[in-house]
Amino acid sequence: MVPSTGGTSSSQPADSAAPAASASMTGREPIRPMSTPRTGMGPLVSAAHRRRVEDHLRAGRAEGTTVVAGGGRPDDLDPALRNGNFLEPTVLVGADRSARVVQEEIFGPVLVVLP
């Protein structure tokens, strides 16, 4: 089972969940304002919230977690949106169950895949 950060789980085996999650992001609808047609995902609610999610990602990397997809600010945004609170959907693997990204609710577009 693959626990999500929201306390639910998937029936997909952990060894195939990360590649499946990463593949599902290929060809995704663009990240842009929610008022734009065909938006796949909009911005986080504030700059402070985006920084908190980015802090979780930094902590995960410091604790040995590997980012297999996403993990940063999108580089394909319209120049007018580059200062927005956009963050790529992110898949993390290799986290120890004691890692901050596992123990704390992230409230962002982050999936932590556990064995």
Image (cartoon, rainbow, N blue to C red):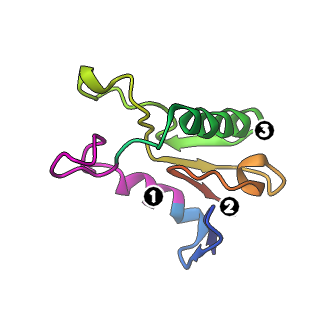
Distance between the alpha carbons at the discs numbered 3 and 1: 22 Å
Disc 1 marks a residue whose amino acid type is Ala
Residue that label 1 marks = 21
- Front residue of this view, candidates 65 and 32: 32
Disc 3 marks a residue whose amino acid type is Glu
Instruction: Identify the residue at horizontal 79%, vertical 52% (top origin).
Output: 96
Q: Mark 1 or mark 3, which is nearer the start of the sequence?
A: 1
Bounds of the magenta segment: 18-41
Q: Mark 2 or mark 3, which is nearer the start of the sequence?
A: 3
Element assignment for label 1? helix
Element assignment for label 3? loop
Distance between the alpha carbons at the discs numbered 2 and 1: 13 Å
Q: Is residue 3 left or right of residue 11?
A: right
Instruction: Identify the residue at horizontal 45%, vertical 47% (top origin).
Output: 89
In this view, 89 is above or below 21: above
Whole-percent x, y for residue 82 in the image? 34, 23
In this view, 53 is above or below 4: above
Name the quadrant containing residue 74. Answer: top left
Element assignment for label 2? loop
- Any mark on residue 63, and which? 3
In this view, 27 is above or below 2: above
**Local crowd size for mark 1, using a 10 Å CA cut-off: few (<14), some (14–19), many (≥20):** some
- Front residue of this view, candidates 109 and 45: 45
3 and 2 marks in contact (CB < 8 Å): no
Q: Mark 1 or mark 2, which is nearer the start of the sequence?
A: 1
Residue that label 2 marks = 114
Instruction: Identify the residue at horizontal 73%, vertical 36% (top origin).
Output: 59
Q: Is residue 59 left or right of residue 89?
A: right
Q: Is residue 27 magenta?
A: yes
Disc 2 marks a residue whose amino acid type is Leu
Q: Main secondary structure of the magenta part?
A: loop
